[in-house]
Image (cartoon, grey):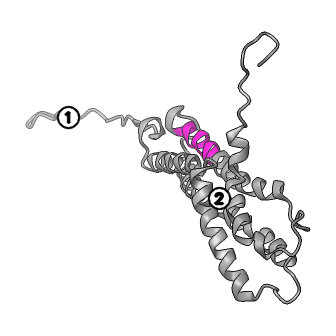
Amino acid sequence: PSSNGEFEDVRPDHMAMAALYALLFFNSLVFSWACETGAWSGFDQEAYAGSLWGGSIGGIVVGLLMIILVSLPLCCGVMKKQGKVIGAIGIVLGLLSLIIPYFGAMGSCAPFMDAACANRCTGFECTQYDKDVALSACQALGVIFVYLGVFGWLACVLGIVAASMACCVCCQCCNAKLDTEVIAVQQTPVVPIVVGQPP
């Protein structure tokens, strides 16, 4: 309890610990490989968690930027003449934001497996097959975890919204429609000529 007699909420920050769940899972699988029970050399847990979070944050940022960019011609009517170019950029980068968390998950497991294999006892070294199988399993779990646990799904939502809005810009919907200029054509009046009379 606190000084005033009330109980304080001392629950851990779940968002800060979420990125370590996948790591703990593989710790239980490969801990028996290590010759020493101490900390593994050459492995940074903060860098592992940062790689998972970095992919998700990168995808979210790209998705938000593309939504803002395509909103200029679509909602505000700004830069309508460059709408096709803006729409193309929004589609490409909007779709790219869907897979940025995937790249973060792919790059997070290699240092983990290198550290696990480096600490195995003499005579029980990792074969390339063992390392490839464990690395594939780690990456598969990392992909599932990064999209469900560390907001990779939000990057997907923002990327789809950005790409959809970019398609609307390319189709000149809403305020992205180009203004049509009306050109007035001046006609010369025709004077009727009566037959039988001199002009």
* Start-end of magenta stretch: 63-73
146 relative to 174 in the view: left or right: right
**134 in the magenta segment:** no
Q: In this view, does 156 lie above or below 37?
A: above
Badge 1 or badge 2: first in the primary sequence: 2
Residue at position x 74%, y 29% in the image: 10
188 relative to 27 in the view: left or right: left
Query: Of circles 1 and 2, which is in front?
Result: 2
Residue sitting nearer the eye, 95 or 173 = 95
Question: Farthest left residue?
Answer: 196
Image coordinates of residue 68 in percent, x first then y, are 60, 39
Image coordinates of residue 167 in percent, x first then y, are 46, 50
Q: Which amino acid does label 1 sit on?
A: Pro
Residue at position x 17%, y 33% in the image: 192
**66 in the magenta segment:** yes
**Is any atom of residue 97 visible in this view?**
no
Report which residue position mark 1 lands on: 199
Q: Is residue 158 above or below residue 40?
A: above
Residue sitting nearer the eye, 117 or 77 = 117
C-alpha distance separating marks 1 and 2:
83 Å
Magenta region, main secondary structure: helix
Image coordinates of residue 88 in percent, x first then y, are 55, 56
- Asked whether disc 1 touches disc 2, contact meaning CB atoms under 8 Å apart, the reply is no
Query: Where is residue 105, by image quadrant?
Result: bottom right
**Is any atom of residue 16 visible in this view?**
yes
Q: What residue type is labelled 2?
A: Ile
Q: Residue 100: which disc?
A: 2
